[in-house]
Image: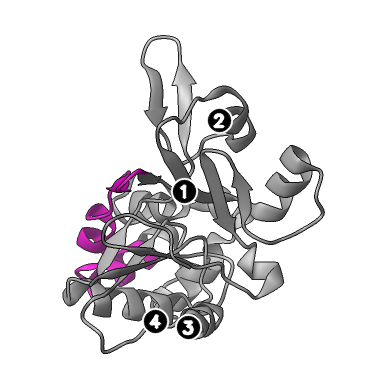
Amino acid sequence: MKRYFVFSDIHGHLKPLIEALDKIGFSMDNEDHILISLGDNFDRGHENLLVYGYLRHFKNKGRLIMIRGNHDDFLLDFLTGKSDGLFNIKYNGFGTTLVEFADQKATSIDLIRDSINQKFPTLINFLESMVDTFQLGNYIFTHAGLTYDTDKGWYIYNFSKMKDFIQTFDPRPYTYVFGHTHAKSLNLYELGINSNEIFYKEGFIGIDANTTLSKTVHVLVFDEAGNLIG
C-alpha cells in the first residue's frame, strides 16, 4: 500500500528533510513511498543543488508530486527571463540559489541566467512540471491555500495571505494542507499557542516549520485512501 510523505518550505535545506523523513519511516528503496513537496524548495539555505538532485531523483522514479511554491516561481521566472531576480536577491534569499547553480565566472544577471540554463538544461522543465494542487481523499494539498477575488471568487494562489484564507474560507468537506506561512505564526495568531509544532485547526493544517531558523522539517504521512496516519 502506498504511503505519501508530505513536507513543505525546506528552502535549500536537505539535511533536515532527510532527518525528518528517516524519523517518520520513509524508505529510499520502497517504491510505494511517495514524496509530496508543497513547494518553496529553494532559496535561503545552502544545499539548493543537493535539494534539486534529491527531488529530481524521485521525480525520475515517479515518486514525487510537486506543488508550486512562490519561491519555485522566483527561480522559474528568472530562468525564463520574466524577472531579473534583483528584488528576490535582496529580500527573499534568492542569491544563495544563484550562487550554487551559476558558473562562478558569470558576472552579470544575463550571464548568470545563461550559465544556469546551460549547466542544467532540464531545470526549467522540472519547475514547469509543478502543479498548483493535489488531492488525496478529502485532503487538498496546496502551497498557500486560496485567495478571494471579487471577479474570480476563491482561487489557488501560491502567495496567499494565510490568515485571511483561514479566517474567511469555508473548507468543508475538505481539509487543506499547506506551507508558506510558519506554523508558529499560525499557532500564535489563530490559537494563542507559542509553538512551532504543526498547525491544526478544523479544515486547515499548516506544516511550514521555518526550517531556515528551526533546522527542522514537519512531515505528514497519508495512506493511499487519503487517511492521515502519521
Query: What residue is pinned by disc 1?
Result: 177
**C-beta proximity under 8 Å, tags 1 and 2:** no
Name the amino acid, label 3: Ile
Name the amino acid, label 4: Phe
Query: Of residues 132 and 186, which is closer to you in this image?
Result: 186
Residue 228 position in % (x across, y down): 43, 59
Query: What residue is pinned by disc 3?
Result: 18
Q: Is residue 175 shown left or right of residue 29?
A: right
Q: Residue at x 72, y 54 (%)?
A: 184
Q: Which of the two labelled residues, at mark 2 and mark 4, occupies the earlier sequence position?
A: 4
Query: What residue is pinned by disc 4?
Result: 26
Name the amino acid, label 1: Val
Q: Residue at x 81, y 43 (%)?
A: 192
- Secondary structure under tag 1 reads strand
Farthest top residue in view: 151
Mark 1 or 2: the one toward you: 1
What is the C-alpha distance between the residues marked 3 and 2? 30 Å
Circle on res. 128: none
**C-beta proximity under 8 Å, tags 1 and 3:** no
Residue 105, can we see it?
no
What is the C-alpha distance between the residues marked 4 and 1? 19 Å
Query: What residue is pinned by disc 2?
Result: 165
Would you call the spot at circle 4 few (<14 residues within 10 Å), some (14-19), or many (20 or more)?
many
Q: Which residues are magenta?
A: 112-138
Does the segment drawn in magenta span residue 99? no
Q: Is residue 89 above or below residue 163?
A: below
Name the amino acid, label 2: Phe
Would you call the spot at circle 1 few (<14 residues within 10 Å), some (14-19), or many (20 or more)?
many
Residue 65 position in % (x across, y down): 28, 61
